[in-house]
Image: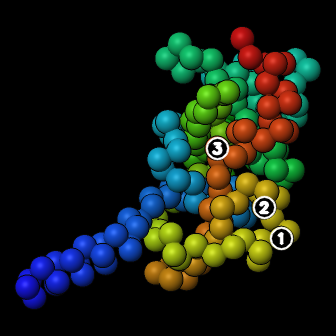
Amino acid sequence: MNNNTSSGSQSATNQATPPAIQYILVTLADHRYGVRLDTLQEVLRYSQLAVAPMLNSPEWLDGITSLRGTILSVVNLRAFLGLPRQTEPTKSGSPATSSRRGVARMLVVANPELTVGIVVDDLEGVLSVQPKQVKTPSAYRGDPALPYLDGVHIDLENKRKVALLNLQRLVASPQMLRFEPAYTL
């Protein structure tokens, strides 16, 4: 009888502790965000050369690109959040879209309404977060991404705060969907 009680107790413990959620760490200007890996279709190096600009589109829309036959809108997350665009010259003299230390990436996010490429400055790795470790984002009141944050995680190993960005909410936001007909093919 003790064995049943002990295994039942272990079972209850396993049910009480949800699994950790994997986040990819991205940088954007001087900000660090975590994006749930399970919300991303894929992550690619970003090349401005592969993007066709669109006339009469919002300033934050870099244009459209084809990803294996699927047309994607390419959103510059810096511009969407009202942060300054990168203006560092590259060897060719054109503005760069990567940070000084990193390579710009495009996070491909799909939802029923839209598939979008979201441009970020760089990737820093992957972070596992227990849901109980997520705090409310009240400390980020001045952060332009506040409406799209799920919370904040204190990364004790690296002694830093990571704002947890919900790209699904961002892609489904009225601001983004308002312009959908202008650039959907």
Give the residue type at disc 1: Arg
Q: Is residue 10 left or right of residue 144?
A: left
**Label 3 SS:** helix
Residue lying at the far front of the rendered structure: 1
Percent coordinates x, y for residue 31 in the rendering: 70, 64
Q: Is residue 171 above or below residue 164?
A: above
Give the residue type at disc 2: Leu
Give the residue type at disc 3: Gln
Residue at 45%, 61% (x, y): give it.
21
Return the residue at label 2: 146
Return the residue at label 3: 168
Pick the quarter of the image with the C terminus: top right
* Mark closest to the chain's N terminus, 2 or 1: 1
Residue 178 makes an appearance in the image? yes
Residues at marks 2 and 1, CA–CA distance in whole angstroms: 7 Å
Residue at 91%, 20% (x, y): give it.
56
Q: Is residue 143 above or below residue 114?
A: below
* Mark closest to the chain's N terminus, 2 or 3: 2
| Disc 2 to disc 1: CB gap under 8 Å | yes
Percent coordinates x, y for residue 74 in the rendering: 69, 30
**Nearer to me, 112 or 103:** 112
Residues at marks 1 and 3, CA–CA distance in whole angstroms: 20 Å
Quarter occupied by residue 142: bottom right
